[in-house]
Image (tube, helix red, strand yellow):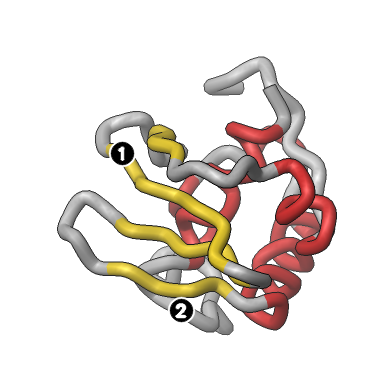
C-alpha cells in the first residue's frame, strides 16, 4: 500500500466540523500537486493547481464516500479509482471528472 493511513469514509458534517476557518493547502492523493481547501458556509471549496474551483456539496461528497466504501482498503488511496476513464477499475458513474479525485485527499489529510 502506498500510504499507511487507512482511509475511512467521513460524513460531510463531520468534515465541515474538522475543517478550520482558514484555507489549507494539502497534497493530492498522488502527492504531485497541491489543492487549496476551505470551508465556506456549509460548503467545502476546493481550488486545484490549475486554479479551477468548485464548491463541493453534500450530494457530491456522499457519492464519493459511497465509492470509497466499495473499494478495498488498499485501493482507497489511489486517485484513479475515483475518476472516469477507460480502465476497468475506473469509476464509470463518476459525478465530477475533475473534482471527485480530490475529495479522498481531504479525507486523507483530515485522518492524520
Q: State whether residue 85 is above or below residue 71.
A: below
- In percent of width and height, residue 103 lies at 56, 56
- In percent of width and height, residue 33 lies at 26, 37
Quadrant where the C terminus sits is: top right
Quadrant where the N terminus sits is: top right
Q: State whether residue 88 is above or below residue 103.
A: below
Q: State whether residue 58 is above or below residue 29.
A: below
Q: Is mark 2 on a helix, strand or loop?
A: loop
- In percent of width and height, residue 43 lies at 60, 70
Nearer mark to the viewer, of 2 and 1: 1
Q: Is mark 1 on a helix, strand or loop?
A: strand
- Residue depicted at 83% across the width and 52% down the height: 14
How many numbered tags mark residues here? 2
Q: Label 2 vs label 1: CA separation?
A: 19 Å
- Residue depicted at 67% across the width and 71% down the height: 42
User: Does residue 87 appear anywhere in the picture?
Assistant: yes
- Residue depicted at 40% across the width and 40% down the height: 28
Residue 34's tag is 1
- In percent of width and height, residue 75 lies at 63, 41
Residue 96's tag is 2
Residue 10's tag is none
- Residue depicted at 24% across the width and 67% down the height: 52
Q: State whether residue 24 is above or below residue 31.
A: below
Residue at the outermost left position: 50
Amino acid at each position: 500500500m502506498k500510504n499507511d493511513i487507512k482511509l475511512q469514509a467521513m460524513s460531510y458534517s463531520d468534515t465541515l466540523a474538522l475543517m478550520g476557518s482558514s484555507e489549507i493547502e494539502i497534497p493530492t492523493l498522488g502527492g504531485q500537486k497541491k489543492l487549496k481547501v476551505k470551508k465556506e458556509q456549509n460548503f467545502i471549496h476546493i481550488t486545484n493547481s490549475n486554479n479551477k474551483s468548485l464548491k463541493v456539496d453534500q450530494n457530491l461528497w456522499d457519492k464519493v464516500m459511497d465509492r470509497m466504501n466499495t473499494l478495498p482498503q488498499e485501493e482507497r488511496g489511489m486517485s484513479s479509482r475515483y475518476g472516469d476513464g477507460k480502465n476497468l477499475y475506473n469509476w464509470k458513474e463518476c459525478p465530477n471528472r475533475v473534482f471527485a479525485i480530490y475529495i479522498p485527499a481531504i479525507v486523507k489529510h483530515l485522518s492524520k
